[in-house]
Image (tube, rainbow, N blue to C red):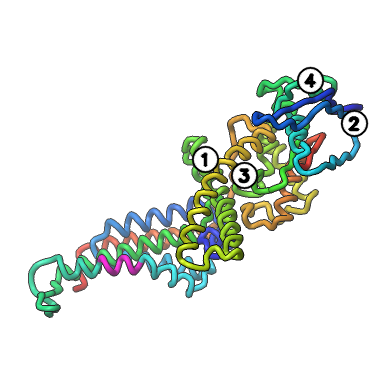
Amino acid sequence: MNNILDDYALMSPLRHRNNWSKLVIVFFGLIIGVSCTSPITPVFIALCMSFTTIAFGRVSPILYFKLLLAPMSFAAAGVLIIAFFSGSGQDLLSFKLIGYPLSIKADGLELALLVLSRSISGICCLYFLALTTPMIELFAVFKASRLPESLIELTMLIYRYIFVFLEIALSIMYAQTIRLGYSNFRRSIKSIGMLTSTLFIRSLEQGDKLFLAMNFRCYNGKMTVFEVHKPIKTIELLLTSIYLLSTISLFYFTKNISIV
Amino acid sequence: MIILETRNLKYTYSDGTVACKALNIEIKQGKKIAFIGQNGSGKSTLFLLMNGTLKPDESEVRFHGITFKYDSKSLREIRKSIGIVFQNSDDQIFAPTVYQDIAFGPANMGYSKERVEVCVKHSLEQVGLFQLQDKPPHHLSGGQKKKNRNCWDYGNGTKSNHFG
């Protein structure tokens, strides 16, 4: 089960850095990326975030680009439609497809590039967070941001049980496979049905056991979240400020620039 | 000194299965006791009776000579001293990291943050999981999960332990 994003985050060297500085970087990138009017700033943000994730987060570049491919294909489909069907004015490129005229106009292309660069920058920011900050580090952040205790507790339990049920599902699937449960299409459908219904029943049972287990350990309605204090280092602060300042200045100077 | 004692204990499940009948047990301090029986002979039921999860139909369970009361406050007191370890570790490990899982018991006992930390670190060292304290439970092996479970009882200062 080495293909879960959270696992990469758990092994990342950036995991033990200050969570708040990472969150600031990500949200800053998202907001600037969405609010800028030229594609240059989002591309800059995407490059910075990818560089940080790969160089400091030690994510293998091949994996990173594979991860980028999935959302990029969605973005590309949307961008193509925008490029062909929006905008007015002078044609940059036009041709006929099965008798139907298609053309790309200058401001349509401009908009398409902006949308593409915005989505890339957003994806890169979120991947930076997802690949360097595992869920278990975020619980302390939730607590510090004063979210309701019961909500945090639920999140913690749900997080834990995702993996328990995943393991149960995989072992059921394995047991079914070795008894030829997936030997043809009909049997596969039947086996999957059995697996799903068993999982529902198991989760009910597991809930009962969880309640017992928590009671055995003197549960009194409160699960404590322990925050490990991770002071921000000078070099991190310096790099973060350089990044924030250069993004803001780029945002300011490319306000009215169009590249098409 | 007798820690736990039952006299003529009887328990019947709601489907009519009689799990325990006429059981007299005395558990003395410092003894290691093993319960051996066939499948379905009521070993696990007995353990659930002995920490107050199930309430016997007849007779009573005594802890240090005092009869179990089944209100949540006195049950919590009993469970500070009597731990249960399930066969399947995943049924019992529910916190997102090893550290938090072990800290759950001591924190519920109302210890200060510093004392919880001392308890947890000490018990982690005892079972040899100190290096793994920041890991989520699904990154542990089966054996390591079992160590994790045993760890909380060191953390809690549990006096009597049942292994289901």
Marks 2 and 3 share the same chain: yes
Circle 2 or circle 4, nearest the eye = 4
Residue A175 placement (x, y as % from top left): 61, 60
Neighbourhood count class around disc 1 (C-alpha, 10 Å): few under 14, some 14–19, many 20 upward: few
Task: Name the residue that disc number 2 marks.
Answer: B28
Give the chain letter at badge 3.
B
Mark 2 Cα-neighbour bin, 10 Å: few <14, some 14–19, many ≥20: some
Q: Are both tags, 1 and 4, on one chain?
A: no
Tell me if label 1 and label 2 are in contact, CB under 8 Å: no
Element type at marker 1? helix
**Nearer-N-terminus badge (2/4):** 2
Q: Chain of mark 1?
A: A
In front: A37, or B143?
B143
Judged from the image, the secondary structure of the residue bearing numbered disc 2 is strand
- Marks 2/3: CA distance? 32 Å
Marks 1 and 2: which is nearer the front?
2
Q: What is the x, y in percent for residue B127?
A: 78, 50
Residue depicted at 79% across the width and 20% down the height: B59
- The residue under the point 57% across, 46% down is A202
Hey, what amino acid is under mark 2? Lys
Q: Which residue is mark 1?
A: A154
Mark sitting earlier along the chain (4/3): 4
Q: Which mark is residue B94?
A: 3
Q: Residue at x 13, y 72 (%)?
A: A105
- Residue labelled with disc 4: B59
Q: Which residues are magenta?
A: A72-78
Residue type at the position of mark 3: Phe
The quadrant holding residue A218 is top right
